[in-house]
């Protein structure tokens, strides 16, 4: 059963400053190495107002990489302020980090949270046993880590969509995942500054780990299908739905069918049965396959730049994989879609200066890059029709 919040009244202050920030056309975000896309597929939505919807998703590794600390969050805030997205989707956020974002961005962004774990000691608290009883009222929230949705405006009705997959959680070597995760997509209807229409944003984190028996992959297939199915009603109601998060799965259908429920039939290779467009839908730069995925006459593809920040020195131009996504339920044309994955390495040993370039990154004693997160900060945009 869905857990739906109470629909709140939307109160949004439309200031000249905010409107100016949202008026950027986003053309500068289309990387110069990307070939022009000329496809002009008509929008699925009916007549309405066209707006450029900007979104970011970031698995910020708030526990494992940052131990629940807030001293490095200014780097994330800078990226948010520079891009001025309408929607912010964050994953692996410790409770105290969520509170920091909510306080720091008060008056501009409205943030909501749902836990992935409530007994997690990686956020800086060594004993989370108080959270194991049946009384949530006495929980130490510093043991919480989960997903965040932020809106440049106001959050409305909350929709926590249970995705399943809690049973038999295992790691790559077959050992159990302890403590086990709870998988809910955090969604909110939102009232966005400068967007006069119905929009819903979702932050998601699916099961992790590859394994030889494909237990986790089967779970991810089911989780993605459940989420896409639950959002069908919102799309039918005329909402533009945006889903951002860590899907822990590759885009190509020959690698996994997990994203079949999101990609549309026209996305090559393989197509899908979904109703969504992925932001970085036409980039082959970082895939080292015998043949490119995205070739003419295809105009939208199951591809994209790696969203994993390398944990050891690169060999040539090798990258690891794309597992983070921004999906839009509607776009006025493929040419309006753009995605850009931005790694956040530390240039200095004391971790105060960010660089995008691995050759400028500092390394630890084992020769591994110092980084804010093992995922990239991923920006996406699409021109959509809101109604």
Image (cartoon, rainbow, N blue to C red):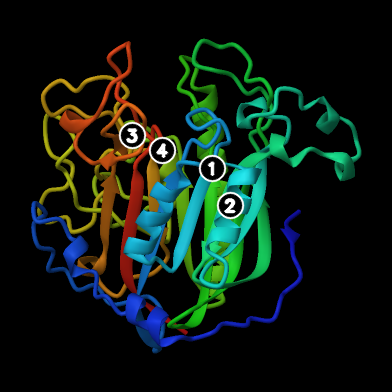
Determine the CA span between mark 3 and mark 4.
20 Å
Residue that carries the numbered disc 2 in the rendered image: 100
Q: Which of marks 4 and 2 is nearer the N terminus?
A: 2
Residue that carries the numbered disc 4 in the rendered image: 257
Determine the CA span between mark 1 and mark 3.
22 Å
The vertical placement of 204 against 36, above or below, is above
Determine the CA span between mark 2 and mark 1.
7 Å
Instruction: Answer with the quarter of the image where residue 361 lies.
Output: top left
Q: Earlier in the sequence, mark 3 or mark 4?
A: 4
Q: Residue 70 carries which label?
A: 1
Answer left or right for 320 relative to 145: left
At mark 4, the secondary structure is: loop
Determine the CA span between mark 4 and mark 2.
37 Å
Q: Is residue 102 visible?
A: yes
Q: 359 or 266, which lies in front?
A: 359
Q: Do the residues labelled 4 and 2 touch (CB within 8 Å)?
A: no
Q: Earlier in the sequence, mark 1 or mark 4?
A: 1
Front label number (4 vs 2)? 2
* Percent position of residue 320, x then y: 28, 28
* Percent position of residue 118, x then y: 72, 36
């Amino acid at each position: 059963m869905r857990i739906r919040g109470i629909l709140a009244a939307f109160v949004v202050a439309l200031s000249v400053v905010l409107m100016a920030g949202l008026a950027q056309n986003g053309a500068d975000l289309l990387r110069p190495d990307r070939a022009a896309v000329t496809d002009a597929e008509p929008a699925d939505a009916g007549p309405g107002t066209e707006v450029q919807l900007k979104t970011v998703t970031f698995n910020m590794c708030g526990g494992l990489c940052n131990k629940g600390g807030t001293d490095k969050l200014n780097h994330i805030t800078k990226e948010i302020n520079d891009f001025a997205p309408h929607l912010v989707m964050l994953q692996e956020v410790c409770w105290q980090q969520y509170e920091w974002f909510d306080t720091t961005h008060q008056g501009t962004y409205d943030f909501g949270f749902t836990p992935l774990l409530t007994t997690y000691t990686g956020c800086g608290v060594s004993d989370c046993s108080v959270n194991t009883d049946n009384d949530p009222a006495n929980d130490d929230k510093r043991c919480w880590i989960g997903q965040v949705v932020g809106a440049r405006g106001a959050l409305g009705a909350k929709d926590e969509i249970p995705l399943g997959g809690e049973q038999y959680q295992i790691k790559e070597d077959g050992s159990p995942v302890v403590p086990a995760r709870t998988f809910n997509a955090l969604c909110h209807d939102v009232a966005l500054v400068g967007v006069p229409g119905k929009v819903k944003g979702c932050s998601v984190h699916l099961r992790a780990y590859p394994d030889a028996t494909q237990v986790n992959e089967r779970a991810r297939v089911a989780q993605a299908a459940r989420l896409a199915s639950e959002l069908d009603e919102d799309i039918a109601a005329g909402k533009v739905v945006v889903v951002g998060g860590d899907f822990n799965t590759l885009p190509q259908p020959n690698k996994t069918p997990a994203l079949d429920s999101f990609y549309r039939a026209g996305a090559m290779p393989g197509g899908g049965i979904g109703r969504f467009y992925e932001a970085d839908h036409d980039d082959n730069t970082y895939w080292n396959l015998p043949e490119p995925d995205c070739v003419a006459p295809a105009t939208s593809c199951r591809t994209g730049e790696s969203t994993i920040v390398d944990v050891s020195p690169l060999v040539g131009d090798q990258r690891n994989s794309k597992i983070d996504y921004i999906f839009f339920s509607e776009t006025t044309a493929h040419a309006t879609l753009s995605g850009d994955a931005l790694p956040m390495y530390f240039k200095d040993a004391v971790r105060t200066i960010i660089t995008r370039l691995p050759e400028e990154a500092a390394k630890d004693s084992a020769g591994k890059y110092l980084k804010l997160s093992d995922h990239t900060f991923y920006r996406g945009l699409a021109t959509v029709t809101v109604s």
